[in-house]
Image (tube, helix red, strand yellow):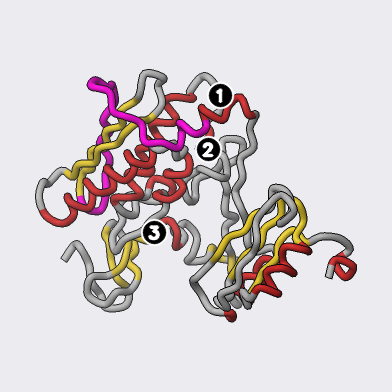
């Protein structure tokens, strides 16, 4: 086996689990390598300084089928399986471990409350900071108390707070919330708010803007963090060229599409009657499929 591989194996998968296969796995795994035992034949592997190789790992996995395992191996071979590894000096190990532990809440925290618009009405997002000026917890309150929507808002605030206190970066939380859509939306273009979670994501964006303003260029105006449809700070605003059509016997006439918002700017959610797309047109939110209109 080692001749065929050109040396010891970094990972050995034992799908049998008998003593001969375990002995073979121990013989071919590299120092510091991994032996994954999936088979349940009941074999035993002696352990000592003479084997397995130094600093090698032996673990078991009792879930999934052989077909599932083959699919995972194929995904790994195609580069579709990734591990997020953060490397840091050994001297910072204690600090890194502390960041992954839930921090205790001090008795006093300072914060700010932002009033955001959402399809369910006004949302009040309070972001409290620790003594280092980092976000520590978030409270979310809808303008109208009670009901399942208020319970959902409180749950989102609690989960965001737990993530922040456990060391999850604010930017990662923002990515998860921004762009979540519901059956309604408010605003147009880059200012559109598609749901309560989207409004919370915008509030986190605004909080971050306030912290980096004047210190560094706003991180959320980059292509990675900017709102859907909004240009980056270093990008000129996109200008759509007017469309023209040629009419028989006449001069080119400006197309009917000139001046219209595109679908991303006019999308206002889904119709409550037929489920089709709502659009803002002629000063009102309308459905062009069934005729629903908020203006009556």
Task: Tell me the SS state at disc 3.
Answer: helix
Label 2 – label 3 distance at C-alpha: 22 Å
Q: Up-down: is 210 above or below 280?
A: above
Q: Residue at x 57, y 78 (%)?
A: 41
Q: Up-down: is 117 above or below 195?
A: above
To which residue does mark 2 refer? 221
The quadrant in which the N terminus is found is bottom right
To which residue does mark 3 refer? 266
Disc 2 and disc 1 in contact, CB within 8 angstroms: no
Q: Is residue 1 magenta?
A: no
Q: Which residues are magenta?
A: 96-120
The image shows residue 269 at horizontal and vertical percentages of: 32, 63
Asked whether residue 11 appears in the rendered view, the answer is yes
Q: Up-down: is 39 above or below 136?
A: below
Q: Which mark is residue 216?
A: 1
Residue 174 or residue 45, whichever sits in front: 45
Q: Quadrant of residue 78?
A: bottom right
Q: Outermost residue toward the left? A: 146
The image shows residue 192 at horizontal and vertical percentages of: 37, 50
Is residue 84 toward the left or the right of residue 64 in the image? right
Task: Tell me the SS state at disc 2.
Answer: helix
């Amino acid at each position: 086996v080692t001749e065929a591989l050109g040396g010891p194996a970094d990972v050995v998968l034992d799908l049998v689990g008998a003593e001969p296969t375990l002995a073979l796995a121990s013989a071919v795994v590299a120092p510091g390598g991994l032996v994954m035992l999936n088979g349940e034949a009941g074999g035993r592997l002696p352990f000592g300084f003479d084997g397995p190789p130094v600093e090698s790992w032996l673990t078991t996995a009792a879930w999934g089928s052989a077909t599932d395992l083959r699919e995972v191996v194929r995904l790994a071979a195609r580069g579709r399986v990734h591990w997020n590894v953060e490397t840091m000096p050994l001297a910072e190990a204690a600090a890194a471990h502390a960041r992954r532990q839930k921090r205790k809440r001090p008795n006093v925290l300072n914060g700010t409350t932002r009033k955001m618009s959402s399809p369910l009405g006004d949302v009040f997002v309070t972001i409290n900071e620790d003594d280092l000026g980092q976000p520590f917890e978030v409270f979310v309150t809808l303008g109208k108390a009670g009901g399942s929507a208020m319970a959902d808002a409180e749950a989102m605030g609690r989960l965001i707070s737990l993530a922040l206190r456990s060391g999850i970066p604010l930017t990662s939380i923002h990515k998860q919330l921004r762009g979540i859509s519901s059956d309604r939306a408010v605003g147009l273009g880059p200012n559109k708010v598609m749901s309560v979670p989207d409004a919370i994501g915008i509030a986190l964006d605004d909080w971050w803007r306030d912290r980096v303003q004047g210190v560094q260029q706003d991180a959320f105006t980059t292509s990675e963090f900017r709102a859907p449809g909004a240009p980056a700070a270093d990008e000129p605003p996109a200008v759509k060229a007017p469309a023209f059509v040629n009419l028989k016997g006449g001069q080119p006439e400006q197309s009917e599409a000139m001046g219209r918002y595109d679908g991303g700017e006019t999308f206002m959610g889904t119709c409550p009657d037929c489920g089709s797309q709502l659009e803002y047109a002629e000063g009102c939110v309308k459905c062009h499929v069934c005729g629903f209109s908020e203006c009556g």
